Image (cartoon, rainbow, N blue to C red):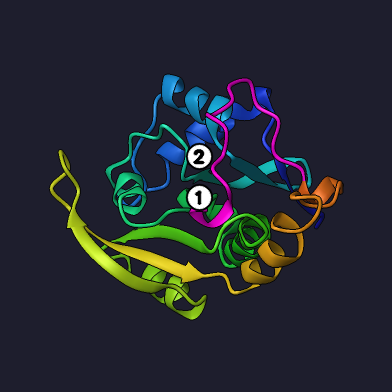
Amino acid sequence: MAIAIRDVREHELDSVLALNNAAGPTILALDSTRIRWFFDNADYFRIADVDGHVAGFLIAMRETSDHESPNFRWFRERFAAFVYIDRIVIAKPYRGLGLGRVFYADATSYAEVRVPVLSCEVFLEPRDDVSVLFHGTYGFQEVGQQIMPGLGKRVSLLAKNLPSFDFVRTTYLEGTTGQLPNQPWLAERRRAAQNSPLRAAGGI
């Protein structure tokens, strides 16, 4: 089985949308307009390609996004710089293979050279114990709870400190070049719409 984590392609959006809407009650449904918005605006939008099939995806946003999610906005009110994991979905035939941890390792690699915090939420109503356990063992800590407006369900807001960012900030972002090395794995995702210019890392 060949697995690749890579940026989503436009022709795969229908597959991603179908996968999202078949995921169950802990993943909010999307429509074609919203999945297109993510394609145009998300800072991180990658799929797991397993032998040519879309086996899962993860979408994440920087703090400068215009994302309307009330959970994203909760973090933006409290953190100067962060990456917010909006959703991760793994197709049923591929669950239990560790793709969730592969995605989170990749998202952490993306985040830790840009921001000091990786954030997300998990549902407490209905309680998603698999997700709660997964995030707890991956180093996330609860930093708050809220009832999602319009949905009436309680979520746990989680954050994970990324200590590697201090090294990156002092060595590169505050150094003589003021930027990361020009390497493919450090490049930003190409997308049709660009957010407003990113604030200096760490909110400085």
**Residue beneath the point at 65% across and 44% down:** 47
Does residue 124 appear anywhere in the picture?
Answer: no
Three-letter residue code for mark 2: Leu
Q: From the top left corner, tell me how far across and down residue 174 is, in percent.
A: 69, 58
Mark 2 — residue?
Answer: 19
Residue 118: x and y in percent read 50, 61
Q: Which mark identifies residue 167?
A: none
At a point 46% along the width and 36% down the height, the residue shown is 65
Q: Measured from the top left, where is residue 16 in percent x and y?
A: 55, 35
Q: Earlier in the sequence, mark 1 or mark 2?
A: 2
Judged from this view, the residue extending furthest toward the bottom is 137
Residue 133 showing in the rendered view: yes
SS of the residue at dot 1? strand
Q: CA distance from mark 1 to mark 2?
A: 7 Å
| Residues marked 1 and 2 touching at CB (< 8 Å) | yes
Residue closest to the far front = 176
Which one is in front in this view, the residue at disc 1 or the one at disc 2? Answer: 1
Asked if residue 105 lies in the magenta stretch, the reply is no
- Locate the N terminus by quadrant: bottom right
Magenta stretch, overall SS: loop
Magenta stretch bounds = 187-204
Q: Is residue 187 left or right of residue 77?
A: right
Q: Is residue 154 above or below residue 199?
A: below
SS assignment at label 2: helix
* Residue pictured at 44% horizontal, 73% vertical: 140
Which dot marks residue 89?
1
128 above or below 60? below
Determine whether, in the image, residue 141 is placed left or right of residue 8. Answer: left
- Please name the amino acid that badge 1 sits on: Val
Q: Nearer the viewer, residue 76 or 192?
A: 76
